[in-house]
Each structure stands twice: as C-alpha cells, then as structure tokens.
Image (cartoon, rainbow, N blue to C red):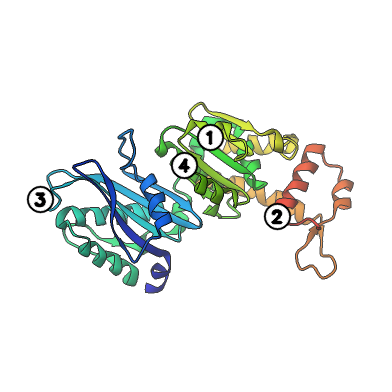
C-alpha cells in the first residue's frame, strides 16, 4: 500500500511571516526550485497587501499541484516571533480535501513544536506508509481520500442555478477543449466553481485542465498558454481585457458568460445544444437528484453524442485511430449547428484526418 503515496507527494515547505511583516521561505523537504518558491510566495497570501487571510488555496503549475494552508499564530510559546505561517504541499494529484486535511495536521504540529523536524517525521510517515497518527494532532490516512470523491466534491447544481441554460456554453467549450477563464475577486469562489467544471465532461475524468489559481504573471501565463484547453481562475479583473487567454470568459461575480469572436463559429448553438441545455437544467433542478446523479445524466447524453460521432468514423489505411468520414457526416443531414458541433468535436477528440 505504501507505493502510491510515495509517487504522489513531491515536497513540503514552510513560509513564515514574522513580527516585522516579512514573509520568507524558512524550510522545505526534500527541495523546491527557486522558480516554484517565488510562485508559492505569490500564492500564499502572506505577501499580499490586502491582508486577507485565505486559510486554504490550491492550484496547478506545470503539471504539479500545490496546496497551501495558512494559519495565524496565537499564543504559541514555540513561535514567539511569527505572526502567520503557511504549510505548502506539492503533489502530483488533484485532491484538495486530502491535502487540506494533511496540511491542517502539519500546522498543528508546527504550532506546538515550532520546529520543522516533527513535521518532516509526519510527512515521511505519510510518504512511506500513507498514514500519520498522533494523539493530540489528529490522524491522517491517505486512503480515506479517493480521487473520485475529489472529482465529485463540487456542486454542478450550484453552477446550473447560477447560469441556467447558459451552462450549455460551458459544456460545449469543455467538450471542444476550449480555453475558459473565470474571474471572481474571491479566490474561494473561484476554486469552488472551477473545480466542478471538469465534471461536465465526466467521460474524460481529466482534472489536469484545471488551473484554479493563476496570477497575471508572465511565467504563469506562458505555462498556461502551453496547454491546449484549460479552465483558469483569476482574482484580478484585468484578465477580462486579456483576450489572448480565453475562448470563453466567465465573470462569476456578475454571472456573465462571454464567448470570444475567435470561437463563435465553432461554438454556434443549435437544436442539439438546446436539448443538452434543457437536459442539464431539468436534471439539476430535480430536488431528488444528487450532484453525482446530475453528472451521470449529463454523461449519458455525452455518451450518446460520442456514439453518434463514432458511427460516422472509419479506420483508414494504417491508422489505428478511427477518423471522421466527412461525407458520412454530410449525408446525415443534421441541422447545421449539430453538424458543425460534431465536426469540431471530432477535431477535439483528434478524429480528423490530417
């Protein structure tokens, strides 16, 4: 059982804010690159001017997930010169609940002992055995936190109650692997909303498209632009003017979705989209249905669409992967928007002949 955890955890780090108001990296194990240290200082809220304390934030940078828990130090004899500190975990997997639970335990250990050594012992215990136990600080068992649970933790129903029929725009953008940028001044709102979106395309179960906490910083934006399709969250309203970053812009604070002119053609809505939109809304508004049942309903509709697409493909010379037969698609005489969507979906699924 020890194996998986050892492959998932990458590093643990500690950032402190002292009584002079300086936030500094004080310790990490085994190591964190200088580039990442700068990034994580930016994310941890201790260097922030607005003095808002974010107890827990998470995000992704270059295929590595970061999870940061920040606490205020109140009467800890072990930490006299420290006002706040952040515990940072770097990991390979998306699982906010798991790492929030683990960082909380590490925080308690540090508050009590004021020394990273004890934290390192717990970190190594989780790394090697997948578990750390202590009477006073609580225990953590990594196998309690299934990845599937993390995928289902957000609420699709909340998204639909905010955006209604427009949710189909988000669904279409995700199906076509477009770039979605989400803005809200509160990072907690961004994280809650963006982490749920990949569930709209449940058949892919791909949370690597999620970049839930991005700053308008050159390195970060370059790394983001290197991804094909993504969901990126920003708390800086200036992102709305960065049309080079998005195909679909979601102003979460004002409940507005804007489709960029660049993808207008690929995202043309028609009868099929209306059907999908109605299905999403009806399912989400059913008080007897849980979020996971709503995801299942949407997923069944997606499977139908993919089956239709598969029926229009052929295996051509020496190509293992079936490709779209454009002639067969034309003969079906679908409404133009449906034909257009299936064609672009085939492109997203890499089913077009090059």
Mark number, residue 103:
none
Other-residue count near label 4 (Cα within 10 Å), few / some / many at <14 / 14–19 / ≥20: some
Q: Nearer the viewer, residue 152 or 124?
A: 124
Left or right of 276, for residue 91: left
Determine the CA span between mark 3 and mark 1: 43 Å
Q: Please report whichever mark, 2 or 1, sits nearer to the chain's N-terminal start.
A: 1
Q: CA distance from mark 1 to mark 4?
A: 9 Å
In the rendered image, residue 314, in percent from the top left (x then y), is placed at 82, 61
- Label 2: which secondary element: loop
Residue 143 in percent (x, y) is at 37, 64
Mark 4 and mark 2 lie on one chain; the one further toward the N terminus is 4
Which residue is denoted by mark 4 in the rendering?
Answer: 215
For the residue labelled by badge 1, is the local secondary structure a helix, a strand or a loop?
A: helix
Using a 10 Å C-alpha cutoff, classify the residue at mark 1 as few (fewer than 14 neighbours), some (14 to 19) or many (20 or more): some
Crowd tier of the residue under label 3, counting other residues whose Cα lies within 10 Å: few below 14, some 14–19, many 20 or above: few
Q: Nearer the viewer, mark 4 or mark 2?
A: 4
Q: CA distance from mark 2 to mark 3?
A: 58 Å
Binning the other alpha carbons within 10 Å of mark 2 as few (below 14), some (14 to 19) or many (20 upward) gives: some
The label nearer to you, 4 versus 3, is: 4
State yes or no: discs 2 and 1 in contact (Cβ < 8 Å): no
Give the Cα distance between marks 4 and 2. Answer: 30 Å
Mark 2, residue position:
349
Q: Tell me where residue 114 sits by quadrant.
A: bottom left
Disc sitting over residue 77 in the figure: 3
Q: Which residue is mark 1?
A: 239
């Amino acid at each position: 059982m020890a194996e998986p955890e050892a492959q998932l955890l990458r590093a643990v780090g500690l950032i402190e804010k002292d009584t002079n108001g300086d936030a500094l990296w004080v310790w990490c194990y085994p190591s964190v690159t200088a580039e990442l240290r700068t990034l994580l200082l930016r994310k941890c809220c201790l260097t922030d001017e607005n003095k808002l304390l974010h107890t827990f934030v998470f995000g992704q940078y270059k295929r590595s997930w970061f999870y940061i828990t920040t606490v205020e130090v109140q009467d800890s004899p072990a930490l006299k010169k420290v006002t706040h500190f952040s515990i940072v975990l770097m990991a390979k997997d998306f699982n906010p609940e798991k790492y929030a639970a683990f960082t909380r335990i590490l925080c308690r250990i540090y508050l009590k002992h004021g020394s990273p050594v004890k934290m390192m012992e717990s970190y190594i215990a989780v790394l090697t055995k997948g578990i750390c136990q202590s009477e006073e600080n609580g225990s953590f068992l990594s196998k309690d936190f299934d990845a599937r649970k993390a995928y289902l933790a957000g609420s699709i129903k909340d998204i639909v109650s905010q955006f209604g029929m427009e949710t189909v725009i988000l669904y279409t953008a995700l199906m076509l692997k477009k770039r979605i940028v989400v803005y809200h001044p509160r990072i907690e709102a961004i994280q809650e909303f963006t982490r749920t979106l990949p569930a709209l395309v449940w058949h892919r179960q791909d949370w690597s498209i999620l970049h839930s906490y991005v700053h308008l910083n050159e390195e970060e934006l370059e790394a983001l632009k290197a991804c094909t399709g993504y969901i990126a969250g920003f708390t800086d309203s200036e992102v709305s003017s960065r049309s080079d970053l998005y195909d679909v812009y979601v102003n979460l604070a004002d409940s507005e979705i804007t489709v960029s002119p660049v993808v207008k053609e690929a995202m043309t809505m028609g009868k099929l989209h209306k059907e999908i939109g109605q299905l999403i809304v009806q399912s989400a508004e059913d008080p007897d249905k849980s979020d996971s049942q709503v995801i299942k309903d949407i997923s069944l509709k997606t499977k139908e669409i993919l089956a239709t697409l598969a029926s229009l493909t052929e295996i051509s010379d020496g190509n293992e992967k079936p490709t779209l037969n454009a002639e067969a698609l034309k003969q079906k005489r679908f409404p133009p928007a449906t034909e257009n969507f299936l064609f672009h979906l085939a492109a997203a699924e890499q089913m077009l002949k090059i």
